[in-house]
Structure formats: C-alpha cells, structure tokens
C-alpha cells in the first residue's frame, strides 16, 4: 500500500493535514485508531472549540467548515476577581466592531467539526481513511517510511506525520522525548444553558484557583472551561448536578440569568508539554503530538491547525522544487517555522497562568492596572485582537491556508 504521506491520528489535526496535502496532489493515508461510527457520533458531550478567524478560513478552504452550526465570537471580555465578589473594575475588552475583519472567531461543537472533516475525507479520492487501525511498528529508511498495522498490513510512504496526541506513539517510536510540567490544575468542561442571550460575547474570568472561560454556543447555551487546582476540581466532579451548579453560580454570576447543565461534565489535567523536536528523519509532529499548552488562551486546536497549514506550505513547496518531501533538511524548515512560535505561545500562556492563578494582593493590583492600561490603548488593543483572531503573521509569516 503505497502513499506519499502516512498520517497517524484521526482526531482533528490528522484529517485536516490529509485534506490540506491532498489539495496539493499528494496521496495520503489517515490511520485512525477509532471506528468511524464513534468519530461521527451525534451526541453532544460538551466539547467545543473557540476557533480563530484564521482557523475558520483554513477549514473553509478545506471544505470542512460546518458554518450552519457555528456561533460568531463578536467580543471578548477579560476580567480578574474572586468568585462571589464579581470582577475587578478594570477589564480588557476586545470588540470586533472596531475593525473590518469580522468576528474574531467562531465557536463550534466537537461533534459538528468531526463530522465535517469526515465528510470531506470521504469525498477526497486522494485520501484513504483506514479505521479502526492501530499502528504497532514504524520504521524509516533513506528513501521512505513504513508502518505496520495490528492486522499485519504494511503501509509505505515518503513521510510519516504524527497527529496522535500528547501520548504520541509516533513521537515515541521516532525517539522524540517530551517532559510534561504539571500545573497542579484540572480543567472541568461542560455546556450550560441560560435564560438570557450571550450576544456572541466570550468571557475569561481569572480567579485565584484558575480561569473560568464562558464561550458562546447556539440557542442560549455557553461552553465553560473551568480551571481549578486538582483537589477542588476533583471535588467539583464528585458533586451531583445541583451541587455543581451551586458551586459554579458564584463564579459564573447572574449576567446570563438562570443556568442549568446542558451536557455531562468532564475533566482533564493541565500541563505544559513540548516535544524536544518537532521532526526526525521522515517524521513530523503536529498538534498535541508536538505541544500541549494551558487552555487559558484557547489556542490548543488553533495552534495545531497552524502547524498543519505551515507543514503543508513546506511540503508543497519542496515537492514543486522536486525535493524529497521526507528529507530532514526539508522537515527542518517546518521546525524552524513553528517551534519558535510555539515556544513564544507557551511562554505567554505559562506566564499568564502564573500571574493570574494566585491571590497575591500586589500582583492582583498590578495585573488589574495592566488590563486597564492595555484597554486604554486602542492601537495595542487592536493588534492583540488581530493576534487572537489568528490573522496576524506572527514570527514567521502566515501560512497560505490561513492568509
């Protein structure tokens, strides 16, 4: 079974990578450990994503943007305070109406995005979606890469891309290490129904235990990502629904009226985790396989899809020049492009988490004044708004799919 590119991981980044490369004429295999029926399940489990305008643009070009199910993010309000006391008087307020670029992003439920990607995969003749299938071995030579599946099938390609998450088997088999640094926090996620409209406003409320993100969904619903220290988060997960809502209300506030749970809750531990390298001979890593960030800035999936877009540019350009797309000097261009940007993003998210996840009175005063100062400088505020929207070139330029 011969391909140009083998992609391990069928979540979100893997299918997007295959679609992007197939647009350039490359034949790809997506090796997915999960059955297609599971991936395409219609039940809403609370998982949602805040996607930047640049990411939405990319997914539209790949034919995988479920626009009918998306909610525009028209404003973002960043505040600081304690649960039950309300926010501090100073805030950072981004309003898309100040610019000409439209909404800063869109909220989309996981189920709709997965199904859109699966439909696009099925419609692309240059892609084989092999599922369910588990990779049990991989090897590289000077001329290509091969993987062996659990059923004995062997697939060959010029390049192997790992899009298989934080515990990436692709990275491990390639000898790429990573050292997670736990934050001692967990993120509790679910969707909330409320009686008042959200008007497309996303909120980030920083509290001593961690931030609470309230993100707009269709039909008077919002997605929440509540980061708390591990002991408190486990206690929140152990509560019944009524107890959880009683704990949430002081932090959530009353600005959206009465609230009820719209989905089950889930929780996951938070850590900073960077692969020591993003590439190895004939191997490249994208998304969580390369980096895991704190969700404080909502950039996890956005950063992963920016990896996909950048790697696509590198591989497409190399192919047009007649180069070997799996050669280490070609892949090094991708690492040179993306790793500094990810390191910068990791520093920002890590620093923000440390600055705001505490109850130090001096730090509280300094950060509140800082938020107010940024908000009072329109040019700086608008520049930050474009960065949040994913339409700023950043350190090494904007990938073609997002431009």
Image (cartoon, rainbow, N blue to C red):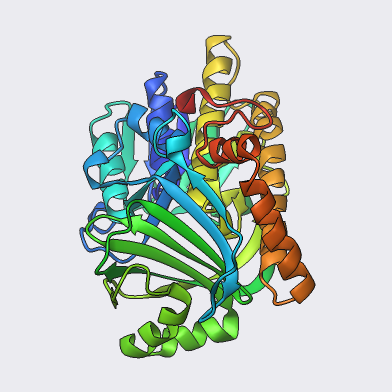
Which quadrant would residue 338 be assigned to in this image?
A: top right
- Looking at the picture, how far across and down is residue 190, in whole percent? 37, 70
Task: Establish if 364 lies above or below 28.
Answer: below
> Is residue 176 at all visible to an observer of this figure?
no
Quadrant, the N terminus: top left
Which quadrant would residue 392 be assigned to in this image?
A: top right
**Image-based side of 353 in relation to 33, left or right:** right
**Image-based side of 361 in relation to 64, left or right:** right
Residue drawn at (64%, 46%), measured in percent from left and top?
376
- Looking at the picture, how far across and down is residue 252, in whole percent? 43, 73
**Image-based side of 401 in relation to 81, left or right:** left
Task: Establish if 89 lies above or below 314.
Answer: below
> Is residue 56 at all visible to an observer of this figure?
yes
**Image-based side of 51 in relation to 44, left or right:** right
Residue drawn at (64%, 76%), measured in percent from left and top?
208
Residue drawn at (51%, 85%), measured in percent from left and top?
234
Foreground of the two, 221 or 310: 221
Foreground of the two, 268 or 127: 268
Which quadrant would residue 238 be assigned to in this image?
A: bottom left
Please give the count of numbered marks on the rendered protein: 0
Task: Establish if 297 lies above or below 104.
Answer: below
- Extreme residue toward the top, this view: 321
């Amino acid at each position: 079974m011969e391909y140009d590119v083998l992609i391990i991981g069928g979540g979100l980044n893997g299918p997007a990578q295959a679609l992007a490369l197939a647009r350039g004429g490359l034949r790809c295999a997506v090796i997915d450990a999960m059955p297609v029926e599971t991936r395409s399940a219609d039940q809403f489990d609370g998982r949602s994503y805040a996607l930047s305008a640049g990411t939405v643009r990319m997914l539209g070009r790949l034919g995988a943007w479920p626009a009918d199910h998306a909610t525009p993010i028209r404003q973002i309000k960043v505040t600081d305070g304690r649960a039950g006391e309300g926010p501090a008087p100073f805030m950072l307020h981004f309003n898309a109406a100040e610019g000409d670029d439209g909404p800063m992003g869109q909220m989309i439920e996981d189920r709709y995005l997965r199904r859109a990607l699966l439909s696009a995969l099925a419609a692309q003749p240059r892609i084989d979606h092999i599922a369910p299938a588990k990779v049990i071995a991989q090897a590289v030579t000077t001329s290509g890469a091969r993987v062996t599946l659990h059923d004995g099938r062997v697939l060959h390609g010029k390049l192997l891309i790992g899009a298989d998450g934080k515990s990436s088997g692709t990275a491990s088999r390639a000898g790429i290490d990573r050292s997670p640094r736990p934050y001692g926090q967990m993120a509790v996620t679910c969707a909330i129904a409320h009686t008042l409209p959200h008007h497309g406003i996303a909120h980030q409320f920083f509290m001593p235990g961690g931030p609470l993100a309230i993100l707009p969904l269709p039909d008077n619903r919002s997605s929440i990502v509540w980061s708390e220290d591990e002991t408190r988060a486990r206690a929140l997960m152990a509560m019944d629904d009524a107890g959880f809502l009683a704990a949430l209300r002081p932090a959530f506030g009353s600005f959206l009226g009465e609230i009820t749970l719209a989905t089950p809750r889930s929780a996951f531990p938070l850590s900073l985790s960077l692969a020591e390298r993003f590439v190895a001979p004939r191997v490249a890593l994208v998304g969580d396989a390369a980096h895991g960030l704190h969700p404080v800035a909502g950039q996890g999936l956005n950063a992963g899809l920016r990896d996909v877009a950048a790697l696509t540019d590198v591989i497409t350009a190399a192919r047009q020049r007649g180069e070997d797309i799996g050669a280490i000097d070609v892949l090094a261009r991708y690492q040179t492009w993306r790793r500094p940007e990810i390191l910068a993003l990791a520093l920002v998210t890590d620093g923000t988490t440390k600055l705001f996840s505490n109850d130090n009175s001096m730090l509280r005063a300094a950060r509140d004044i800082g938020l107010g100062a940024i908000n009072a400088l329109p040019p700086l505020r608008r520049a930050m708004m474009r960065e949040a929207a994913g339409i700023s070139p950043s350190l090494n330029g904007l990938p073609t799919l997002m431009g």
